[in-house]
Image (cartoon, rainbow, N blue to C red):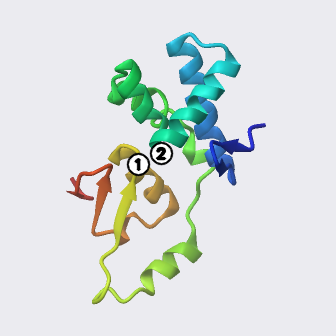
Amino acid sequence: MRERIGAFPINTISQFVAHASTDQYFINHLSLPLADALNLHNTYYTQYGLALEGLVRNYKIDPLEYNALVDDALALEDIIHPDPQLRRLLQDLDRGKVRLWLFTNAYINHGKRVVKLLGVDDLFDGASPKRLLIPLNS
């Protein structure tokens, strides 16, 4: 099992599944052997903070196709469940002083899917995928 992606430890099953799915994309769509796919994934993740960024820059990969085949294809319902403790923590914030905003380096539909599975999607005022700001209910 992979223990790290670049300098970052894999701490959860969801991280492992997501990274394994990305590795498979590198193997299938770039026709790379496993060792080369793992190395390139680590390089892009370390260099760009997101493997997809390296794929788009260097291979002209369609990010929406990638999203459909990788992030949207993950069986997150099997590994991410409502988190009442997280919900209480977010609800306890003084909303008069703080607006809750979801930041994600993935496409917005993936971020929305994750917070919905966690049972906290209704607590966010909006979301920011990459460098864009959009209302969460759009």
What element does badge 1 sit on? loop
Compared across the picture, whether 87 is left or right of 112 comes to: right
Residue at horizontal 62 percent and vertical 46 percent from the top = 15
Res. 81 image quadrant: bottom right
Compared across the picture, whether 138 is left or right of 92 comes to: left
Residue at horizontal 55 percent and vertical 63 percent from the top = 82
Neighbour tally class for label 1: few under 14, some 14-19, many 20 plus, Cα within 10 Å: some
Residue 94: x %, y % from top left = 36, 89
Residue 102: x %, y % from top left = 36, 62
Above or below residue 115? Residue 77 is above
Residue at horizontal 60 percent and vertical 37 percent from the top = 19
Residue 106: x %, y % from top left = 40, 45
Q: Which residue is mark 1?
A: 105
Quadrant, the N terminus: top right
CA separation in Å, label 2 and label 1: 8 Å
Res. 3 image quadrant: top right
Pointer 2 or 1: first along the chain: 2
Res. 116 image quadrant: bottom left
Q: Mark 1: which amino acid? A: Asn
Above or below residue 56? Residue 74 is below
Q: Which residue is mark 2?
A: 49
Q: Label for residue 53?
A: none
Q: Mark 2: which amino acid? A: Gly
Above or below residue 60? Residue 74 is below
Please say if the residues under marks 2 and 1 sit with CB atoms less than 8 Å apart.
Answer: yes
